[in-house]
Image (cartoon, rainbow, N blue to C red):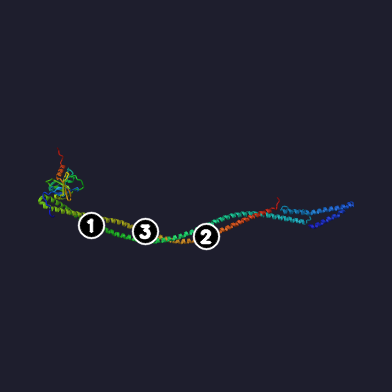
Amino acid sequence: MGEAPAMTDNIGKFLVFSLQGQRYGLDLAKVAEVGDSPRISAIPLVPACYSGALNFNGDIVAVIDLALLLGLTGNERPGKIVVLHREVSSLAFLVEMVIRIAAENELTHRMPSDNAFAAATLWLPDGDVTLLDLEAIIHEAENIIKPPKIT
Amino acid sequence: MRIPIGHKFIIGFIVVVAAVAFSPGAVARLGYSPELSGVLGYVVAMTTGLILGWLFSKGFTANIEKLADSAKSISRGDLTGEVTIRPSRIPDEIHELAYLIDLMLQNLRELVRHIKKTSGQLTESAREINATAQEINASTEEVAQAIGQISRGAETQARLVDKGSKTIREMAISIELVAARARETAKTARETSLTAQHGGALANDSLERMKEFFEKQEQIGQQFDTFNGKLQKVGKVADCIGDIARQTNLLAINASIEAARAGEYGKGFAVVAEEVRKLADGSSQSAADIGEMIEDLRVESRKVHEVILESSHSIKEGKKNIDVTASAFQEILKTVLDTERKASSIADLSLMQKEGSARMVLAVDDIAKVADDNAASTVQVSAATGEQLAAMQNMAIATRELTQLADELMVVVERFQIDNG
């Protein structure tokens, strides 16, 4: 194991995963758990990106196929699930593969992204990672499922 | 009564003399003067003597003149008449002469008639002989020409026979060569039959070995199945390890999440969790490597198996081929034996042919000799014919002369008249 690098609360960490062969990142503080894709109960009359619902330690969590939500196309089937912290949102994302946890001090470069759902592009030694804007995604997920506003 | 002519003369003379002697007496009886009677007696005696002498001489000479006339006309060639004199009661030598001349005339007439007839026949025959001689001459010339052609033909024949003889000698040599080749062929066929037998034995041996190979190949197939089964088991173990590594990875990530949430307190745990995650990654990677290796092994072993199957297919085909080859060798053997038999037969036949051609050479030589003899003979015949032709020409000339002579004879004989008118 050796000498661990100095870790403080200030040092951010990211969960690196893949969607349709591309690497994405989420703030690790917002993630509750990762796991193999469990049995998901289908929810009727919801948009296609809602894969269903699951029971996470007694909480009902809506499962979103993150690739479909982001509008990515490809043949890779999601194999892992990333459950968000209940304080952030009662949502879980189906992703293709969980890769690793990256620390902010590993970054060689960080640049803003023009993608609506991306907060920044992180340059890691093992490749680029698109850091997702979780708030924008949650907002989009809620927008999709909400009925049109009556003014 | 025959009185010789001399006696007749004497009698006549006596009569005349008597008449003369008796005339003066008779006159004196007439009563004339004696002078007158003397003169008249002389005159009467002379006249009576003259008249009687004239009558006697006329009686003698008339027949002689007739005979002279007949002899004259005979001498002119007139044999038509008859020698006739007045018949007399008292024939003499003149009558005998007339009779003999008449007999001679008749004989001459007969002779001339015969000569005329014969000379006519002779002329006719000579003409015929001449014509025949000319015909023979012409025929002989044709024969000479024909013999000349035959002679030339015989020379050509002799030349052709000579050529034929050469050709037959060459043919005899060719036949000998054929016999030699046929013997070689028979020998080669015998050797080939040995080779074919050897080949057939080798093909059968190959078939036996292939049978062994197939048995072993079946064993290898079973061993491969066992190997693959064990490999699958290893794979399953590797999958299990991979699964555990993955779950460990997720657990480590979740531990990292929890450690992050624990803040300062979880820092050490986060490090441990990260190390666990790395180990899990390593394990997962190793398990994946093992899986890949097993997969590679399976692929490779499948390939090997397929190659073996393929080669066994090929060998099956090869077996078929070898079967075919073995039967082909049998066929070859049969054919070669047949070939050997035929070649031997050809050799025997060409030996017979060789003997036959030798005899033929002798025969042709004989023929050539005969042809040469023929050519020589025809030359002789040609010469003989030439001589014959010359002889025939001579004969033609001779017959022409003969005809001429016959004609001349005819002319001479024609001078004699034997018939009236």
Determine the secondary structure under disc 1: helix
> Seen in the image, is B16 located left or right of residue B103?
right
Name the residue beneath numbered marker 1.
B227
Quadrant of the image for the N terminus of chain B? bottom right
Query: How many numbered marks are there?
Result: 3
Name the residue beneath numbered marker 2.
B372
Amino acid carrying label 2: it is: Asp
Residue, x 31% and y 57% (percent of image)?
Answer: B318
Amino acid carrying label 3: it is: Ile
Label 1 CA crowd tier, 10 Å (few <14, some 14–19, many 20+): some
Q: How far apart are marks 1 and 3 (CA)?
A: 47 Å
Residue, x 69% and y 55% (percent of image)?
Answer: B112
Q: Distance between the residues labelled 3 and 2?
A: 56 Å
Q: Nearer the viewer, mark 1 or mark 2?
A: 2
> Seen in the image, is A101 located left or right of residue B53?
left
In the rendering, at what x and y percent does residue B24 appear?
A: 87, 54
Q: Do pointers 1 and 3 mark residues of a single chain?
A: yes
Amino acid carrying label 1: it is: Phe
Q: Is residue A37 visible?
A: no
Q: Do pointers 1 and 2 mark residues of a single chain?
A: yes
> Seen in the image, is B251 located left or right of residue B162?
left
The earlier-in-sequence mark between 1 and 3 is: 1
Q: Can residue B39 be seen in this view?
A: yes
The earlier-in-sequence mark between 1 and 2 is: 1
The earlier-in-sequence mark between 3 and 2 is: 3
Name the residue beneath numbered marker 3.
B332
Instruction: Find out whether the residues at labels 3 and 2 contact each other: C-beta distance under 8 Å.
Output: no
